[in-house]
């Protein structure tokens, strides 16, 4: 974004991701998933039952926020029996990092 302008379609996609991160509960959920060892492993995940206790909101509210994170491409999930397990999608976080990264300064030879 700072190295070169982004096109309209990419701006729309990125805005959806940033909007998902704009809610404190969703930001904390993403942080909790990422802080959990299983949450950093695609396909392993962290059980939603381990996430709900950190919040003073209902389980359906947590489910809604997790759905928004999933739809934004920040996390993925899998149902195992009665529980759902969530993990971070590193490609989306890398994309955000790349978009926000400042370009490396050009070193000039002063000879």
Image (cartoon, helix red, strand yellow):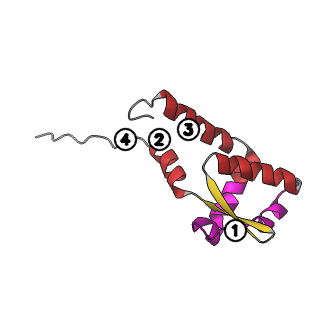
- Indicate the position of residue 31 as horizontal and vertical percent values: 66, 57
Question: What residue is rendered at 56% in x and 37% in y?
Answer: 13
- Indicate the position of residue 76 as horizontal and vertical percent values: 63, 58
Would you call the spot at circle 4 few (<14 residues within 10 Å), some (14-19), or many (20 or more)?
few
Label 3 – label 4 distance at C-alpha:
19 Å
Q: Which residue is mark 3?
A: 14
On residue 24, which mark appears? none
Instruction: Find the residue positioned furthest to the left.
Output: 111
Q: Which residue is mark 2?
A: 99
Would you call the spot at circle 3 few (<14 residues within 10 Å), some (14-19), or many (20 or more)?
some
Q: Is residue 94 left or right of residue 54?
A: left
Q: Which residue is mark 4?
A: 103
* Sooner in the amino-acid sequence: mark 3 or mark 4: 3
Label 4 – label 1 distance at C-alpha:
35 Å
- Indicate the position of residue 85 as horizontal and vertical percent values: 71, 66
Q: Secondary structure at mark 1?
A: strand
Q: Are marks 2 and 4 in contact (CB under 8 Å)?
A: no
* Sooner in the amino-acid sequence: mark 3 or mark 1: 3
Question: What residue is rendered at 42% in x and 29% in y?
Answer: 5
On residue 46, which mark appears? 1
Magenta residues, start to end: 29-55
Q: Nearer the viewer, mark 3 or mark 4?
A: 3
Q: Does the magenta portion include 43? A: yes
Would you call the spot at circle 1 few (<14 residues within 10 Å), some (14-19), or many (20 or more)?
many
């Amino acid at each position: 974004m700072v190295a070169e302008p982004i096109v309209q379609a990419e701006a729309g996609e990125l805005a959806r991701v940033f909007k998902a991160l704009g809610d404190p509960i969703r930001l904390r959920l993403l942080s909790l998933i990422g802080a959990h060892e299983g949450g950093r492993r695609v396909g392993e995940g962290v059980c939603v039952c381990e996430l709900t206790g950190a919040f003073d909101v209902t389980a359906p509210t947590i489910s809604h926020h997790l759905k928004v994170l999933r739809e934004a491409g920040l996390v993925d999930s899998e149902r195992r029996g009665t529980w759902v397990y969530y993990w971070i999608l590193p490609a989306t976080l890398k994309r955000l990092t790349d978009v926000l990264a400042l370009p490396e300064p050009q070193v000039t030879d002063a000879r």
